[in-house]
Image (cartoon, helix red, strand yellow):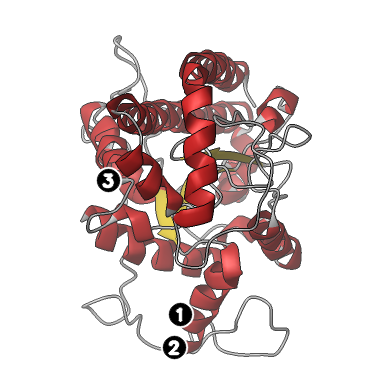
C-alpha cells in the first residue's frame, strides 16, 4: 500500500476496534439470544456450540502492514460459529472461507491471494450461527439489540465505503506517479504501467433485497458513494455475487460462463471466451460488438468533471482521470492477468447482480 492508503486503513482499523468495544456492552444479552436462536431460530436447529465472542472483530486486520498489496475487499454477512471462537476471531475461516480461498488458488490468472491481498469484512460484526438467526435475535431481544444490529450495519457500510474510496484514490495516484516517472516505458506499453483499482465484492445477497436483514447496509453503502460524488466508482468497482458457502459462488459463475459459451474457471478444457474476438456478439450489449463495460475515451469513471481531483479541495490533476492509451480497464496495450477473460466475466456477472440489488 502507499503511505496514504495505509493511513486510511489504519484509521479504519482503529475506529473499528473502538466500535467493537462499544458494542460489546451488549454481550450478556446477546449470548442468551444467540444460544436460543441456534436452538430455535431455524427449522432444523443448530448443534450446540460455545459462544465466545458475541460481537466479533476480525483479528486478521491486525496483521495487515504497509507492505501488503490490497486488491480486493470482500464483504460477508456476519461472523459464524468458527469465526467467533476466541482462538480464531477471524472472518471467513469456516467452510465458506475455504471455498473462497480455493477459488482464487485455482485461478491464479486473477493474481489474488485470498489470505494476503484481500480485506475481509462483514455487514455486521454481531455473531449468529446462521445469518437467518439474526431475525430471531432482533424479534426476541430488547429494542436496544435491534438498534445495535441496525447501527452496526450503517457504521460498517459507511466506514467500508470510505476505506474503499481511499484505497482507490491511492491506487490511482500511484498510477499517475508511475506514468510520470516512466514516460519512455509508458509510450511503448502504457497499459503495463497502470495500477488496477481495488474492487469491493459483496458475497451473499439474499438478505440485501425484499425484507432482508441488511437493507440498511445496502442503502447506506450506495448513499455513501453518492454523497462523495463517487457513484461512478461504485458502478465500476463494486460487485455483488452469490456467497462462497455451499459453493454457490462458483456454481453461479460457472453457469454464467457456460451460457455465454466460455470456459468454466475450474476447467482446463478449451472453449470460446464470451468476450474474445472469435466469440461473437456480447449478449449483454444492445449493440452488436459493443462491450457495456468498456470505457469511452476521455471519460473519468471516478469524476463527473474531467481533470478535477474530487478528493482534493484544491484544484489540480486528478490521478483517477484517464489518459489516452492508459485505461486500466482496457485490454489494449499489453497483457495482464488482472484483465483476463475470467476477470471480465466476474465484472459482468457481478454487475448484473449489483444492478438487481442496488438498481445501478
Residue furthest to the top? 314
Measured from the top left, where is residue 67 in percent x and y? 75, 26
> Which numbered circle lies on residue 259?
2
Measured from the top left, where is residue 329 in percent x and y? 46, 53
* Residue identifier under label 1: 256
Query: Is any atom of residue 301 visible in this view?
Result: no
* Residue identifier under label 3: 215
Between discs 3 and 2, the one toward the N terminus: 3
In the image shown, does 269 or 331 lie closer to the viewer?
269
| For discs 3 and 1, the disc positioned in front in the rendered view | 3
Q: Is residue 170 above or below residue 90?
A: above
| Image quadrant in which you'd find residue 181 | top right
Q: Identify the residue at image location x=24%, y=30%.
A: 229
Measured from the top left, where is residue 268 in percent x and y? 73, 84
Circle 1 sits in a helix, a strand or a loop, which is it? helix
Labelled pair 3, 1 in contact (Cβ < 8 Å): no
Labelled pair 1, 2 in contact (Cβ < 8 Å): yes
Circle 3 sits in a helix, a strand or a loop, which is it? helix
Measured from the top left, where is residue 38 in percent x and y? 53, 51
Q: Residue 273 vs residue 159: left or right?
A: right
Labelled pair 3, 2 in contact (Cβ < 8 Å): no
> Which numbered circle lies on residue 11?
none
Q: Is residue 259 above or below residue 48?
A: below
In the image shown, does 298 or 200 lie closer to the viewer?
200
Circle 2 sits in a helix, a strand or a loop, which is it? helix
Q: Residue 106 vs residue 125: left or right?
A: right
| For discs 3 and 2, the disc positioned in front in the rendered view | 3
Amino acid at each position: 500500500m502507499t503511505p496514504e492508503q495505509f493511513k486510511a486503513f489504519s484509521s479504519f482499523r482503529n475506529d473499528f476496534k473502538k466500535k467493537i468495544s462499544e458494542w460489546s456492552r451488549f454481550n450478556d444479552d446477546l449470548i442468551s439470544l444467540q444460544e436460543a436462536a441456534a436452538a430455535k431460530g431455524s427449522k432444523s436447529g443448530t448443534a450446540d456450540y460455545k459462544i465466545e465472542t458475541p460481537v466479533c472483530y476480525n483479528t486478521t486486520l491486525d496483521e495487515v502492514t504497509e507492505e501488503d498489496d490490497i486488491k480486493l475487499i470482500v464483504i460477508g454477512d456476519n461472523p459464524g460459529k468458527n469465526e467467533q471462537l476466541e482462538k480464531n476471531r477471524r472472518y471467513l475461516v469456516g467452510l465458506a472461507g475455504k471455498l473462497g480461498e480455493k477459488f482464487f488458488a485455482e485461478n491464479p490468472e486473477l493474481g489474488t491471494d485470498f489470505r494476503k491481498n484481500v480485506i475481509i469484512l462483514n455487514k455486521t460484526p454481531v455473531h449468529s450461527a446462521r445469518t437467518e438467526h439474526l431475525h430471531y435475535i432482533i424479534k426476541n431481544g430488547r429494542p436496544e439489540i435491534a438498534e445495535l444490529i441496525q447501527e452496526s450495519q450503517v457504521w460498517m457500510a459507511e466506514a467500508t465505503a470510505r476505506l474503499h474510496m481511499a484505497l482507490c484514490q491511492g491506487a490511482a495516484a500511484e498510477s499517475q506517479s508511475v506514468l510520470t516517472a516512466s514516460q519512455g516505458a509508458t509510450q511503448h506499453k502504457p497499459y503495463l504501467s497502470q495500477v488496477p483499482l481495488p474492487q469491493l465484492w459483496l458475497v451473499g445477497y439474499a438478505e440485501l433485497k425484499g425484507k432482508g436483514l441488511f437493507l440498511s447496509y445496502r442503502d447506506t453503502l450506495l448513499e455513501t458513494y453518492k454523497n462523495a460524488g463517487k457513484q461512478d466508482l461504485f458502478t465500476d468497482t463494486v460487485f455483488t455475487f452469490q456467497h462462497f458457502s455451499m459453493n454457490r459462488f462458483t456454481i453461479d459463475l460457472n453457469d454464467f460462463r457456460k451460457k455465454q459459451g466460455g470456459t468454466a474457471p475450474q476447467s482446463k478444457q478449451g472453449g470460446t471466451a464470451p468476450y474474445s474476438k472469435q466469440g461473437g456478439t456480447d449478449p449483454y450489449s444492445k449493440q452488436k460488438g459493443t462491450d457495456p463495460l468498456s470505457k469511452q475515451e476521455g471519460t473519468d469513471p471516478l469524476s463527473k468533471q474531467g481533470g478535477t481531483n474530487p478528493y482534493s479541495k484544491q484544484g489540480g490533476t486528478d490521478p483517477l482521470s484517464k489518459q489516452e492509451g492508459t485505461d486500466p480497464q482496457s485490454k489494449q496495450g499489453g497483457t495482464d492477468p488482472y484483465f483476463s477473460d475470467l476477470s471480465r466475466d466476474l465484472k459482468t456477472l457481478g454487475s448484473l447482480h449489483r444492478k438487481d440489488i442496488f438498481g445501478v
